[in-house]
């Protein structure tokens, strides 16, 4: 941990753990914010400021993302008064760089890649999108609010190849890192870009020692509480290996449930789980019943390693 981070060593150790999983250099850093929505907003504001600095643009008016991006990207765009260009995801829910290329325009300043899409769990083609961002001078943000936890499991890390070249990342530990609500890790590969966008100046703040790391500088906030301690404490007690195992176990449970659904007469597995989201449909429901349930597709998202596949499958049998 660099000297700059010395003032908030525990939160910054936790952020450093995530930065290491992403393969980011010592320049990386960030802060814990209230949730993924605020994390996405802070990252995308930093993206636009960065873009404006090196390439003053008329518009700086559009974010490119997948049609499977979380609703918070739309919310962020409304707050920032920019457009969202949604690229149709492929049949697995994944956005590829090839599909994104035709949608690029002068207005685009950032690409948002899903690191675990909320509806289907897809991880976008991060390596291809990193190439694209590099070639066109765009910021690449990875929304790993749910799926970023998978970085901790070595077997799943390859799905995120290219993340080492992303500019920002969020991971919401309440989703799949077994932490309570209200702490989202927001990281920049070069923390300086976060500070350039978010650092506040005021006479009464002049007494704050600007030579030290100040977590207030990395998101849309000033006064804050030390949210990151929740995850730090659990990591310190259980160790990072326990996290890797718990995430791998969760993934295995999701695979076992998906296989069980596939083998159950009367249930249709609609998508092989990419992380731990399982989409399926009972065959015997007519359209009216489906509509009464409110969805044509049933979704399970497994985030607890103690969930048992046999118990879930026993419940699902009752749908057939
Ligand atoms: C992929 C993704 N991004 C962003 C969010 C928004 O996070 P929050 O509810 O913490 O604002 C979520 C929440 O489910 C999510 O799954």
Image (cartoon, rainbow, N blue to C red):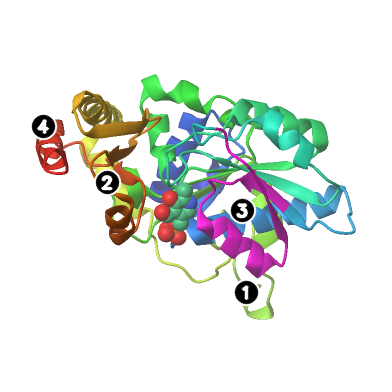
Q: Residue 89 magenta-drawn?
A: yes
- First reached walking from the N terminus: tag 2 or tag 3: 3
Q: Which of the four quarters of the rendered structure image does ligand 1 lie in?
A: bottom left
Q: Nearer the viewer, mark 4 or mark 2?
A: 4
Name the residue that disc number 2 marks.
Answer: 178
**Residue shown at 61% from the left, 39% from the top:** 189
* Residue 66 shown left or right of residue 254 in the figure: right
Mark 4–mark 2 Cα distance, whole angstroms, equals 22 Å
Task: Residue 124 in the image: state x and y as whole percent.
Answer: 55, 33
Name the residue that disc number 3 marks.
Answer: 43
Q: Is residue 55 above or below residue 75?
A: above
Ligand 1 within 8 Å of the CB at mark 3: no
**Residue shown at 28% from the left, 49% from the top:** 286
Mark seen at residue 310: 4
Mark 4–mark 1 Cα distance, whole angstroms, equals 57 Å
Q: Residue furthest bottom?
A: 204
Mark 2–mark 3 Cα distance, whole angstroms, equals 23 Å
């Amino acid at each position: 941990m660099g000297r700059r981070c010395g003032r908030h060593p525990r939160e910054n150790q936790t952020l450093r753990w995530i930065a290491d999983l992403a393969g980011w250099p010592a320049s990386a850093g960030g802060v814990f914010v209230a949730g993924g929505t605020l994390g996405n907003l802070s990252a995308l504001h930093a993206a636009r400021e960065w873009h404006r600095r090196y390439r003053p643009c008329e518009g700086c008016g559009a974010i490119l993302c997948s049609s499977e991006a979380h609703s918070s990207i739309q919310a962020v765009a409304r707050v920032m008064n920019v457009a969202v260009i949604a690229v149709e995801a492929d049949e697995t829910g994944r956005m590829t760089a090839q599909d994104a290329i035709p949608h690029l325009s002068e207005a685009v300043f950032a690409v948002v890649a899903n690191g675990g899409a909320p509806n289907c769990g897809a991880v976008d083609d991060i390596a291809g999108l990193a190439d694209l961002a590099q070639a066109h001078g765009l910021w690449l943000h990875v929304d790993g609010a749910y799926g970023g936890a998978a970085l901790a499991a070595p077997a799943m890390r390859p799905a995120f190849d290219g993340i080492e070249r992303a500019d920002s990342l969020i991971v919401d530990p309440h989703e799949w890192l077994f932490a309570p609500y209200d702490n989202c890790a927001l990281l920049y590969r070069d923390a300086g870009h976060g500070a350039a966008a978010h650092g506040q100046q005021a006479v009464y703040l002049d007494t704050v020692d600007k030579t030290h790391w100040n977590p207030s500088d990395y998101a849309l906030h000033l006064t804050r509480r030390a949210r990151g301690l929740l995850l730090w404490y659990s990591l310190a007690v259980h160790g990072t290996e326990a996290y890797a195992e718990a995430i791998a176990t969760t993934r295995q449970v999701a695979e076992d449930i998906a296989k069980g659904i596939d083998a159950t007469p009367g249930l249709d597995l609609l998508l092989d789980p990419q992380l731990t989201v399982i989409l399926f449909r009972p065959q015997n429901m007519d359209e009216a019943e489906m509509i009464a349930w409110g969805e044509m597709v049933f979704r399970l998202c497994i985030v607890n390693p103690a969930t048992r596949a046999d118990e879930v499958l026993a419940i699902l049998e009752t749908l057939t």
